[in-house]
Amino acid sequence: MAKLSNPFTLGVASGEPLPDGVIIWTRLAPEPLSRASVPGGMPNQNVKVRWQVAEDERFTRIAAEGTATATPAHAHSVHVKVDGLRPGTEYFYRFRVGAPFADTTSPVGRTRTAPARDADTPLRFAFVSCQRYEHGYYTVYRHIAQQRPDLVVHLGDYIYEYGKPANPAPGRYVRKLEPPEAECKTLPAYRNRYARIKSDPDLQAAHAAAPWVTIWDDHEVKNDYAGKLPGDGSDPAAFLRRRTAAYQAYWEHLPLRVRPSGDALQMYRWRPYGKVADLLLLDSRQYRTKTSMLGADQERWLLTRLAESQARWRVVAEPLFFSRRLFAGNRTSADAWDAFAAERTRIVDAVRASGRPNLVVISGDVHNHWAAEVLTDFADPASPSVGVEFVGSSVTSAPPETDVDAVLRLNPHIKFFDGHRGYVWCEADGESFTAEYRVVDHVDRPGAPVRTVARFSVVDGRLKRADA
């Protein structure tokens, strides 16, 4: 058999850092957009993959190594659980394969373990969301990679399931999707959509620069789906098969600790960062009903974690606008926490009962930057605040039409808006939490420089403009 070409076309990644280890990931795909029965242009056979984790980028001090098996059933993806590492430590990792390839080594990735539970180690992280491939270039990720964060948090819409529209709006079809440019509904289609976007060099650079933790929103499956229902009145059984395929493809392409089980994939979880931060990641889609965003089990878990957390900052990472956001005519969004106000009140009450106004909500979805204070009563601007919400803009996805002046007038707890594409850079320690809103001026072509448009600190549950 002739030797195959480079299998590491989709790069490498790490994620889910704990004090003693991380997950490292790659996927073998010499022809990433192949539409053959076996994905990625791979042979229909298992392939042994060697991996190494080192204390230095030249791999002279090996900390751990071993072999993994890439199988056709999982698109020849590789998820290695690396244990026995030191807390709060930078490491480097790589993969290598032999037959049926010429001996080939992957790019080198950088990762970092979480600090020990009793450590005061500061945390530097970026959070992002909404990276619709056809809407533009991933320049934002190049800038994140250059900052070498301790962590990247992705808040959903890693892919978009849409096909190419019949008549794309100007500026909204900048890059071509994978052939046949159709909506994703099957496992092969979802796999190729991930392969298309993960071929992007800037996204690969950001994955290789730091460990990631991710949650999903709706477009990883289907716009506006809720639980096991498609949201458009179509056949629930057919949709559940589609959701199961989408969840598998999501796992295959990201460095997750937990794999799919049946038609489910456990996504809500706790990631502690020493005494500085407890990161609580929420799943707003899989368990949603008409009356609950999170479902009963996940809500109980969250309320318990909020009550028991002893970290300086309780950071809730979730995709959707958490604070009240009234529009002109006192309208609200049906796909935000305003549609689940009673559930939001229970969360706010749990934080208030603790007596510590140290909640930080990070969210995305709305394709613009916002910053707000989380009040105990959003109808009363003078009510106490239990913390803040930082809403990040999209990486590329085009923004909606928004009457910003009306929103800011009707919602005095919302303190900031910016309409550029970008990300939010956060730094936390035992005394302070700051957030920088970073933007690029264009995504219709690569290479935009980045700039900071606002910087906030959190003081006693309130926002303080730090760049004024």
Image (cartoon, grey):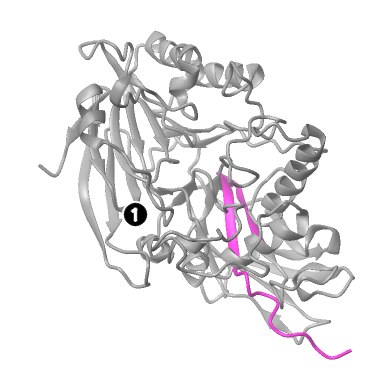
Q: Nearer the viewer, residue 114 or 410?
A: 410
Q: From the image, tell me which residue sits under label 1.
A: 421
Residue 19 belongs to the span the image colors magenta: yes
Q: Which residue sits at x=43%, y=64%? A: 136
Is 363 located above or below residue 395 in the figure? above
What amino acid is at disc 1?
Arg
> Residue 398 appears at what percent x and percent y?
40, 53
Q: Locate residue 390: give its quadrant.
A: top left
Mark yes or no: residue 412 visible: no
Is 268 located above or below residue 260 in the figure? above
Please give the range of residues in magenta.
1-25
Which residue extends farthest left? Answer: 468
Q: Which residue sits at x=84%, y=68%? A: 38
Q: Nearer the viewer, residue 300 or 19?
A: 300
- Element type where label 1 sits in the image: strand
Mark yes or no: residue 416 visible: yes
Where's the N terminus, which quadrant? Answer: bottom right
Is 366 located above or below residue 79 in the figure? above
Residue 171 belongs to the span the image colors magenta: no
> Residue 380 appears at what percent x and percent y?
25, 10
Q: Which residue sits at x=84%, y=91%? A: 2
> Residue 313 appears at what percent x and percent y?
38, 29
Q: Is residue 69 left or right of residue 397?
A: right
Which residue extends farthest front? Answer: 167
Mark 1: few/some/many CA within 10 Å (<14, 14-19, 20+): many
Q: Locate residue 142: give its quadrant.
A: bottom left
Q: Is residue 291 left or right of residue 376?
A: right
Q: Locate residue 378: give its quadrant.
A: top left
Q: Which residue sits at x=33%, y=12%? A: 376
